[in-house]
Image (cartoon, rainbow, N blue to C red):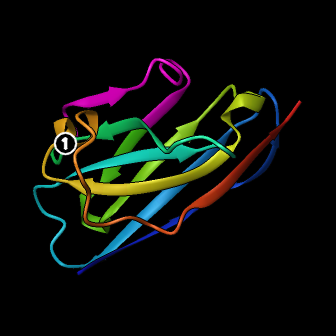
Amino acid sequence: QMQLVESGGGLVQAGGSLRLSCAASGRTFVGYAMGWFRQAPGKERVFIAGIQWSGATKYYADSVKGRFTISRDNAKNTVYLQMNSLKPEDTAVYYCATAPTIATFVRKLPLDYWGQGTQVTVSS
């Protein structure tokens, strides 16, 4: 079993920034890609950013490209999402997940482990 715990959400004004963290524990974290998803009220959960184990390859959805940055610290078993220039449409519950590769996220394949989510609210 792997446990994923997100933190760092909150209320911020449009144009502001937040940094989300996702700490992994339990089974090995080694070699796995990590991803961030979000789910707005009444909408499906969507993949927005992913990073492979080495950190050399990253993926961003068009909706966040240029504003969000994903990173990871494997020594701390933690993945981060730096969110800048936030917009009201970024309001959602943000989740992290793990998978063998980023392609698993992109192809919407089933995932075994999810965090509980952290709420991000961006006011206009």
Q: Determine which quarter of the picture holds residue 83.
A: top right
* In this rendering, position of residue 24 left or right of residue 104: right
* In this rendering, position of residue 72 left or right of residue 8: left
Q: Is residue 34 visible?
A: yes
Question: Is residue 114 placed above or below 63 in the rendered structure?
Answer: below
Q: Residue at x 15, y 73 (%)?
A: 28
Quadrant into which the C terminus falls: top right
Residues in magenta, as a range: 55-69
Q: Which residue is drawn at 44% across and 66% down?
A: 115
Q: Determine which quarter of the picture holds residue 18.
A: top right
Instruction: Give the percent coordinates (x, y) of residue 106.
Output: 27, 33
- Relative depth, front residue between 55 and 24: 24
* In this rendering, position of residue 58 left or right of residue 92: left
Quadrant into which the N terminus falls: bottom left
Q: Which residue is drawn at 81% across and 29% down?
A: 14
- Relative depth, front residue between 103 and 78: 103
Secondary structure of residue under mark 1 = helix
Instruction: Give the percent coordinates (x, y) of residue 12.
Output: 81, 43
Q: Name the residue under label 1.
A: 104
- Relative depth, front residue between 93 and 7: 93
Q: Which residue is drawn at 20% across and 53% down?
A: 99
- Identity, as a three-letter code, of the amino acid under mark 1: Thr
Mostly what secondary structure, the magenta segment? loop
